[in-house]
Image (cartoon, grey):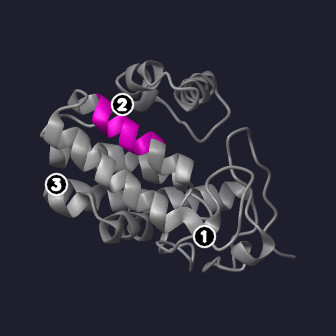
Amino acid sequence: MGLKLEYIPGQTPLDEDEKEGLLLPTIGTRADLDEFEQANIEEAVGWTMTNRFPLQDILTENFIMLVHRKMFGKVWGWAGTKRRTNKNIGVDKFKIAVELRKLIDDCMFWIDNQTYDQDEIAIRFSHRLVSILIFPNGNGRHSRLMADILISNGFGKTVFTWGGGDLSAQTDIRKKYLESIYKADAGNISPLVEFARS
């Protein structure tokens, strides 16, 4: 039978070999997958709330990969590993490590030089992270949690509210979120910073 998934705008489809990484053979539908992924993500969020991570640890490739593994490791065998296929968005699979290194270096520069305010640094980091598209799936959810970890652990501020609704369903909140992402893609980060605090 296999895993049959329908995608809404803004979701990156999984290749058939990536679907093979599913650790729970009883999952057959998008609803089942969403339920198990959400439970795993909630555990990861709990882990981030009960631990303190210094800034120098957050801004490392190892930590970025660990967060994805914590979020999806009970559902996907490839959780916390770089994608091996190219997608219709994101950088070429062979450039992921280089672009991730550039992002980490840029973010440290922004912090050291107070280039932007702290909210904007966290959102710029999150936006660049998702645009690299490190993983086969879960990049948006991962990048938002990374922004929350950076703003709370790195800067001591409250986590973002991200519109206060479900961003995984096809809702007006998701539409507004995607519109702010597209504006950020075009060089205007302000709507995404505002959305993150709405």
As drawn, is 192 to the left or to the right of 6?
A: left
- Magenta span: predominant SS is helix
Give amino acid for label 1.
Answer: Phe
Frontmost residue, 98 versus 181: 98
Discs 2, 1 touching: Cβ within 8 Å? no
Residue, x 24% and y 39% (percent of image)? 110
Residue, x 43% and y 59% (percent of image)? 100
Report how far apart the C-alphas of labels 3 and 1 lie in the structure. Answer: 27 Å
Q: Position of residue 171 (x, y in %)?
A: 64, 27
- Determine which residue is flagged by label 2: 161
Asked if 119 appears above or below 22 in the picture, the reply is above
- Determine which residue is flagged by label 1: 94
As drawn, is 18 to the left or to the right of 180?
A: right
Report how far apart the C-alphas of labels 2 and 1 lie in the structure. Answer: 34 Å
Extreme residue toward the right, this view: 1
Q: Quadrant of the N terminus?
A: bottom right
- Determine which residue is flagged by label 3: 55
User: Tag 3, which secondary structure?
Assistant: helix
Mark nearer the viewer, 2 or 1:
1
Give amino acid for label 2.
Answer: Thr
Asked if 46 appears above or below 170 in the picture, the reply is below
As drawn, is 19 to the left or to the right of 110?
A: right
Magenta stretch, residue numbers: 120-127
Q: Earlier in the sequence, mark 3 or mark 1?
A: 3
Q: Position of residue 130 (x, y in %)?
A: 51, 48
Residue 53 appears in the picture as rendered: no
Residue, x 34% and y 44% (percent of image)? 147
Dot 1: within a 10 Å radius of its alpha carbon, few (fewer than 14), some, or many (20 or more) residues?
Answer: few
- Picture quadrant where residue 115 is located: top left
